[in-house]
Amino acid sequence: MSNQLALDAIGDPMRRRILEKLADGPAPVGELAAVLPIGRPAVSKHLRVLSDAGLVTHSSRGTRNLYVLAPDGQREIQQWLVSVWDSVLGSFAAHVDSVNDSERTSL
């Protein structure tokens, strides 16, 4: 999975809502469409994007496809967010140290 594909996929609010719904457990397209303000064809398109990004998987159960969150699908996004956050915190700490140092020297 590519970081960029996953981030692009979750950039759409409807896809985030689908992921939130799937966090409750596996669901077929019809069940997802019933709780979203879009129809089954649109849900299917969003699921395809999420699947291509490695965020969801599906399995056939009889005549239905059940969609579920991919076990490691959000790991790369989480790792990216942690690295960005660590960088931000490091910059903030350096700034605080610099301010403290300048205050000490001006006393």
Image (cartoon, rainbow, N blue to C red):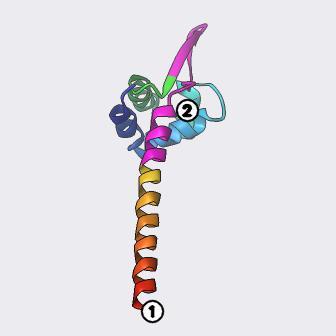
Considering the image in quadrants, where does the C terminus appear?
A: bottom left
**Position in image of residue 77 (x %, y %):** 45, 38
**Label 1 environment density (alpha carbons within 10 Å; few <14, some 14–19, many ≥20):** few
**Quick check: is 73 in the magenta stretch?**
yes
At mark 2, the secondary structure is helix
**Position in image of residue 34 (x %, y %):** 57, 35
Q: Which mark is residue 32?
A: 2
Residue 74 appears in view: no
Which residue shows up at 50% across the image and 40% down it?
A: 78
Closer to us: 59 or 90: 90
Q: Against 105, is 12 above or below?
A: above
At mark 1, the secondary structure is loop
Question: In this picture, which residue range is highlighted in magenta?
Answer: 57-83
Residue 6 in the figure: left or right of residue 64: left
Q: Which mark is residue 107?
A: 1
- Name which residue type carries label 2: Leu
Closer to us: 3 or 67: 3
Which residue shows up at 44% across the image and 24% down it?
A: 54
Q: Which mark is residue 21?
A: none
**Quick check: is 46 in the magenta stretch?**
no
Q: Against 51, is 60 above or below?
A: above
**Label 2 environment density (alpha carbons within 10 Å; few <14, some 14–19, many ≥20):** many
